[in-house]
Amino acid sequence: MEILIKAMDALWQVLLVGLLLGVGLPALFALGVRILNSDRQLVGVGPAGEEITKPSAAAVTGAVVCFGLCVLAVLFGIVVIVFGKQLFGV
């Protein structure tokens, strides 16, 4: 019974990390893209009559935060892969 409890404890931890990294990071990236495309301001009209828009400063700031968190998570993963033995001593 003790082995089953330890296995379930490890299983929920793996499931939590898998959900966080497997769903959380792509969702955070998609949120950054959505924010960047949501609040656009009209700049002018192009030669073919199409509207030229740019994102607002608040949208750029929100997108940079989302993309920055994604980059930090990727860099942290690389550090763990490269320096895992020194960090965790296993």
Image (cartoon, rainbow, N blue to C red):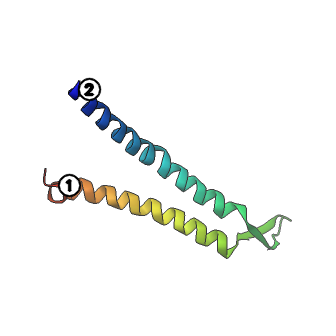
Q: Toward which corner of the image does residue 31 lie, by quadrant?
A: bottom right
Position in image of residue 67 (x %, y %): 51, 63
Above/below status of 40 relative to 9: below
Q: Are marks 1 and 2 in contact (CB under 8 Å)?
A: no
- Mark toward the start of the polypeptide (1 vs 2): 2
In the rendering, at what x and y percent does residue 21 appear? 42, 48
Residue 11 in the figure: left or right of residue 53: left
- Closer to the eye: label 1 or 2: 2
Q: Please, what secondary structure does the residue beneath circle 2 have?
A: helix
Q: Image point 30% across, 57% down: which residue?
A: 78
Pinpoint residue 25: horizontal percent, then vertical percent. Answer: 48, 52
Front position in the image: 45 or 42: 42
Q: Give residue 35's position: percent from left, percent from top.
A: 65, 61
Q: Residues within 10 Å of mark 1 (few under 14, many from 20)?
A: few
Report crowding for label 2: few under 14, some 14 to 19, many 20 or more residues within 10 A (C-alpha): few
Q: Identify the residue position indicated by label 1 in the image.
A: 84
75 relative to 28 in the view: left or right = left
Measure the C-alpha gap from mark 1 to mark 2. 28 Å
Residue at point 66%, 76% (across, down):
57
Residue drawn at the location 25% of the way across and 33% of the way down: 6
Which label was assigned to residue 4?
2
Is residue 69 toward the left or the right of residue 44 in the image? left
Rendered view: 61 above or below 15: below
Callout 2 amino acid: Leu
Q: Residue at x 49, y 49 (%)?
A: 24
Q: Quadrant of the N terminus?
A: top left
